[in-house]
Amino acid sequence: QALLMESGGGSVQPGGSLRLSCVASGRASRRACVAWFRQSPGKGREGVAEIPTEGGTSYHHHSVKGRFTISRDSAKNTVYLEMNRLKPEDSATYYCAAGDGPCGLSAVFYKDWGQGILVTVSS
């Protein structure tokens, strides 16, 4: 069984910060790539950032580059998404996903998905 559990979402004012966590277990913990996606009402699912689980460089979508940082703690089977200088347009449900590769920001590469966690940026 593959399980991905997200945490750390919530409400924040514009300019604020949040850190999302994704803990992988079972088959999901052995996948080669982990990524964060987001989806807001009326829009498609958008890849935000991805990271290989055993070495290699991460990649961030241009809309979040310089504000968001994806990182991993392999010992804890956990991937983080540090989100700074949040904007109202960052509001969405954020999903953690794991796949066997190639690593990228296309949802078709990922087999295991978390339930999603809501992030709301509003004044």
Image (cartoon, rainbow, N blue to C red):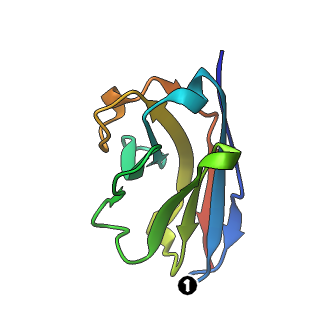
* Residue 20, visible in the rendered structure: yes
Residue flagged by tag 1: what amino acid is it? Gly
Q: At x 70% / y 47%, what residue is drawn?
A: 76
Q: Residues within 10 Å of mark 1 (few under 14, many from 20)?
A: some
The one of 13 and 23 positioned closer to us in this rendering: 23
The spot of residue 1 in percent (x, y) is 66, 15
Q: Is 101 on the left-hand or right-hand side of 39?
A: left
Q: At x 64% / y 70%, what residue is drawn?
A: 18
Quarter of the image with the C terminus is bottom right
Per the image, the residue denoted by label 1 is 15
The one of 21 and 89 positioned closer to us in this rendering: 21
Q: At x 33% / y 31%, what residue is drawn?
A: 101
The one of 3 and 120 positioned closer to us in this rendering: 3
Q: At x 52% / y 75%, what residue is drawn?
A: 86
Q: Is 33 on the left-hand or right-hand side of 5?
A: left
Give the secondary structure at mark 1: loop
The spot of residue 73 in percent (x, y) is 61, 54
